[in-house]
Amino acid sequence: MAIDFTFPDEVEDARLLVKRFMGDVARPKMAELSSRRASGDDWRQAIKDLRQTARDQGLWAPHMPEEWGGMGLGVTAVAAMSAEAVKTNMGPYLINCQAPDEGNMHTLLHFGTDEQKEKWLKPLCEGTMRSCFSMTEPEVAGSDPTQIQTSAVRDGDEWVINGHKWFTSGAHGADFAIVIAKTDPDAEIAQARNSAFIVPTSTPGFEIVRDISTMGGGGGHPEIRYNDVRVPHANMLGEQGGGHKLGQVRLGPARLAHCMRWLGTIEQALEMLVDRAQKRYAHGSLLSEKQGIQWMMAESALELYSSKLMVLHAAYKIENGMDFRSEVSMAKHHVANTLWKTVDRALQVHGALGYSNDSPLAQMLIQARWSRIADGSDEVHLMRIAEMVMRSYNETGSVNHAVGDLPL
């Protein structure tokens, strides 16, 4: 039998390495800083020191090849590490595997020229630069990038970019943005109208209008205006008209990377639910002895189990160069909804404590609600899944290709 649900030694070693670092080094330091209400400068220095410690321990950029300073691990190992890292505040950032830089590193690795990699990818991998991805616009549906209105017009050896973006996550403090803009408005195929550009945030005309206020307050998702922003032709990332393809190549694995991190949060929320239920006494018994609470535990466990299997199988398909579109869409929808439901149940069991900011659950629930919109809303993924199910049936007489292509 080829089916084996145990991790190979190198994957398990990587998972345990990040688990020990977060548990023995990062979390105690975070707790100490919080308990003494450390200053902003103290926090910044501590994060810098923790990143250096992680790097010294060989725990750095697990998703990147060794020649770029990473650990050279596959998608499955990164999934295991991400699920552990996210249980610690800023955990993915401490090991240089955080969004949006993680996705931008992949994008530059696969689409960048040698010069672009040296100038932009190398500093990202070293942790000396930060980046953002600028695609979503307020005037058009973010789930349909063929409608993008931001334009890039060729002027000699330069491109002039004009447009309006928002939810450019991480733009504050970023050194450059990867911008999707319309270069070929008359292209017959809508998906061939956009191109991608590397835009240094110091370029004249790059304007951060404001940070978008969200359910969670300031969310680090700025609104941007591009006012006659000029970049050299050498800053085009990938081929002209290839912006849509680049975005989809980037967002496929990036969606799964979100799912990897969400697994850790789901597990953390379920553990908090179980712990609270076994300690809280009300109406003659512990909460854990009440059927309604047991069902919350059981449903969360069932959904977490299926979420883990989905993520592992999608990672397996990516690593083996197989078509993973259906599996990633299914995982993104299912894991995001499992995150939402499990955190909500945990908050309910915690009662007023869960609703307060004395517990992390309130902020976890806000982030969980975002998960059902970011990188494709629930409804768009359901539409794509239905399309792939119909295509599989019409082309092969079976839906199996669209539901994992498993030998069952």
Image: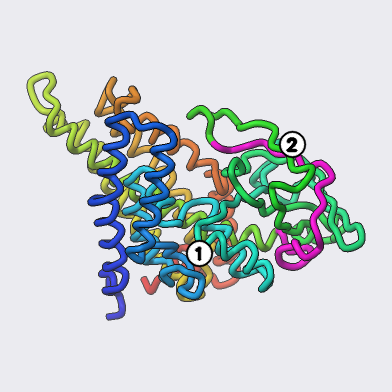
Q: In the image shown, does 396 or 61 lie closer to the viewer?
A: 61
> In terms of image quadrants, where is residue 286?
top left
Foreground: disc 2 or disc 1: 2
**Residue 28 circle label:** none
Give x and y (percent) for residue 399. Answer: 50, 65
Question: Which secondary structure dominates the residues rendered in magenta?
Answer: strand
At label 2, counting other C-alpha atoms closer than 10 Å, the crowd grade (few under 14, some 14-19, many 20 or more) is few
Determine whether the residue tagged by mark 2 lies in a helix, strand or loop.
loop
Q: Quadrant of the N terminus?
A: bottom left
Tell which of 407 and 33 is nearer to you.
33
Amino acid type, residue under disc 1 in the picture: Ala
* Number of dots carrying numbers: 2
Residue 396: image quadrant is bottom right
Secondary structure of residue under mark 1: helix
Q: Which residues are magenta?
A: 220-243
Query: What residue is disc 1 on?
Result: 402
**Res. 140 visible in picture:** no
| Crowdedness near tag 1: few (<14), some (14–19) or many (≥20) residues, C-alpha within 10 Å | many
Q: Is residue 234 magenta?
A: yes
Q: Position of residue 42 (x, y in %)?
A: 39, 38
The colour scheme of the drawn protein is rainbow
| Residue 242 versus residue 149 in the image, above or below | below
Name the residue nearer the viewer: 367 or 152: 152
Q: Residue at x 40, y 54 (%)?
A: 51
Residue 175 visible? The answer is yes
**Residue found at the very far left of the displayed protein:** 284
Measure the alpha-carbon separation of dots 2 and 1.
33 Å
Image height check: is 154 above or below 139? below
Q: Quadrant of the C terminus?
A: bottom left
